Amino acid sequence: MGIIIFATVLITVAGGITIRLLDKKDFSSIGEGMWWAVQTVTTVGYGDVVPHGTGGRLIATVVMLTGIAFLSLVTASVTALLVEQARQRRQQPEDLIAARLDEIGTRLAAIEARLQGREPGP
């Protein structure tokens, strides 16, 4: 997850700087380029600053896809964690039930053996 976060931040910063270098008309400062990159990668996209040139739109595509991938991976990770926790909670009672049934089976075999006049087996 750390690698994904690092890559997302790197692409966002690189996108903010590069958009300023490629499209100085629409992005008057690096700060404005960074603002655009952050709102693009987070999929907010206010639309207050947008690239109009082909190069800027290609950068925007990379930043957008990175943001979508990041959000998808975070959602998948959280979902996997919650599913695993639920599975473990369900598994514990099943293990307890199986152990209890084994104990009952052993006791029942001992009772049957006594009733038949022989010692119980292992």
Image: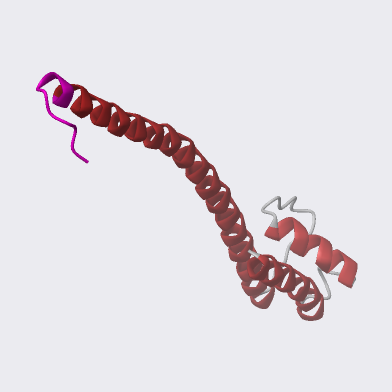
Give yes or no for residue 117 being in the magenta stretch: yes
The location of residue 4, given as percent across then percent down, is 63, 67
Camera-nearest residue between 63 and 26: 63
Q: Nearer the viewer, residue 72 or 32?
A: 72
Residue located farthest toward the top when viewing the structure as drawn:
115
Query: Looking at the picture, does residue 107 appear above or below residue 37?
Result: above
| Left or right of 12 in this view: 75 | left
Q: Position of residue 114 (x, y in %)?
A: 17, 23
Please name the residue shown 50% across and 49% down the image: 80
Count of numbered tags: 0
Find the magenta span and give its range.
Answer: 113-122
> In the depicted view, which residue is nearer to us: 33 or 103?
103
**Residue 115 percent across, percent down from the top left:** 13, 19
Q: Main secondary structure of the magenta part?
A: loop
Q: Residue furthest bottom?
A: 21
> Residue 17 falls in which quadrant of the image?
bottom right
Which image quadrant is residue 116 in? top left
